[in-house]
Amino acid sequence: MRRPVALRLSAALSTMALAAAAGAVLTMPEASAAVAGGATGYASQNGGTTGGAGGQTVRATTGTQIHQALCGRASSSTPITIEVEGTINHANTAKVSGDSCNTAAGVIELKQISNVTIVGVGSGAVFDQLGIHIRQSSNIIIQNVTVKNVKKSGSPTSNGGDAIGMESDVRNVWVDHATLEASGGEDDGFDGLFDMKDNTQYVTLSYSTLRNSGRGGLIGSSETQLDNGYVTFHHNLYENVDSRTPLLRGGTAHIYNNYYVKLNKSGINSRAGAHAKVDNNYFKDSKDVLGTFYTDTTGYWQVSGNTFDNVTWSSPGTENHPAGPNPQSNTTVSIPYAYTLDASSCVPAIVTSTAGANKGLKVSDGNCSTTNPTDPTDPTDPTDPTDPTDPTTPPGTNLSLGAGADGSSKASGTSYGNVRDGDLSTYWSPAGSTGSVSVKWGSATTVSAVTIREAAGAQGVTGSWRLLNADTGAVLKTGSGAGAITIPATSLRKLTFEITSASGTPRIAEFETYAG
């Protein structure tokens, strides 16, 4: 299967007045935003899930700024990508009013809106005791965030106790590389980590970690609410969860290549006529990992390629219908999209290294190894620098070849000069997540285009940046993410690429410069 290509979020410029009203930093539209990869599973169906692609990109460090960014759009469907860094909590999340939003205090409210991406960048985004509520909305992407300890009772409360909750005519949501966690079960004030109800469809949860909770998540809030479904769960880690991984009432779920560790009471609970396709998962140290539980209204499952490692099974009863100890299919489920399965024996290693926030957005390559969503060595990838049709390579000579280079905070084993040697296997890194690297010439040189290429294994790590005329200190451009950058033709002797935030340690393979 073709590896997904990074979403390019190029947008028209918006006014600085709008950015000020939103209380967030506006990044320039030619740069690609931090969200990486493309929606997989059922989120790729029904027209697909692209989030804020094609819209402006803003930065938010508080929940109020997230709401302000939503409310500052021209309409409730104007695409927007909100890059979030820092801790979002009750103290910094207030209701904001506007024609393009419908927000509330104490919760990130995505209500009656569409075409939105929320992505964690830099040092990370943590929603602390504060849930994300998606209601009557569509085309939403949430990537690289942590949501923890959301309560429905006690203090403070948020989102009915759900880390991420969807309800009331929700369509096309992709949650990717998220960490969703609680610190107990219902008696401790927590509810579900990932809930869908009241006509929610075309959802994918991928490369995420769900842990330390009484309830992993549900699809449908009652035995009569059967209008939810078409949900994909793949390459997720469920760890120390009592039940609902997920609970499926009606509808269809595709559940593959997940790693389940310590499911304490039950796992995949297919009820009320639901259909679950359960492929190549790894279940370990768990109980009753598949079946119909706590009801006499049974569901169905198709199983293949799963590994059951120290799994125990209870005896069948009136309201207890375990699929084991030798699970067999009792239905067939047709899947409308292409996908590649890792062997279940590889799943623990693959999922452990990829699932959750701040993992560099690594994914499986379908062959029991990991890769990044954009692969510069893939000859079919239009961002491949060896592809003569690569749109990120301007015509003309790369002026950086043979130029000089310097910078700040060189990491061990790398060199400033690696960014202008034409070799993608060498790179420069700062000592941490920020730093600068420069290309310099012996005499004034006119530059109007720049291409920043990240090294293999580090694509998507670079966050926000500034491009500086080092002769004068003038800021020529700001933006986020590696890729092609255009600037007004400028004559200078030294050009600096300054990284101001990243999701890890950046690795810049090439800092290319062109006259046009």
Image: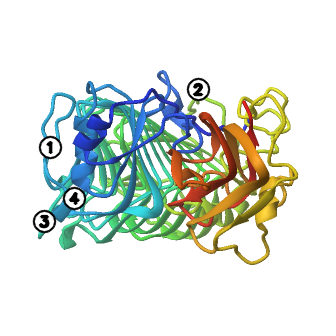
Dot 3 amino acid type = Ser
Question: How far apart are labels 4 and 2 at the CA level?
Answer: 33 Å
How many residues crowd around disc 2 within 10 Å: few (fewer than 14), some, or many (20 or more)?
few
- The residue depicted at 34 percent of the width and 57 percent of the height is 193
* Secondary structure under the numbered disc 3 in the rendered image: loop
Tell me where residue 338 sits by quadrant: top right
**Upstream in the sequence, badge 3 or badge 4?**
3
Dot 4 amino acid type = Gly
Q: Is residue 383 left or right of residue 357?
A: right
Q: Position of residue 168 (x, y in %)?
A: 23, 33
- Label 2: which residue? 336
Q: Position of residue 45 (x, y in %)?
A: 51, 26
Q: Nearer the viewer, residue 356 or 287?
A: 356
- Label 3: which residue? 153
Question: How far apart are labels 3 and 4 at the CA level?
Answer: 7 Å
User: Which of the labelled discs sits on residue 96, or is there none?
Assistant: 1
- Mark nearer the viewer, 3 or 2: 3
Q: Nearer the viewer, residue 197 or 374?
A: 374
**Upstream in the sequence, badge 4 or badge 2?**
4
Dot 2 amino acid type = Pro
| Res. 263 in view | yes
- The residue depicted at 66 percent of the width and 37 percent of the height is 5
- Label 4: which residue? 161
How many residues crowd around disc 1 within 10 Å: few (fewer than 14), some, or many (20 or more)?
some
How many residues crowd around disc 4 within 10 Å: few (fewer than 14), some, or many (20 or more)?
many
Proximity of marks 3 and 2: CB atoms separated by less than 8 Å:
no
Total of numbered circles in the picture? 4
Dot 1 amino acid type = Val
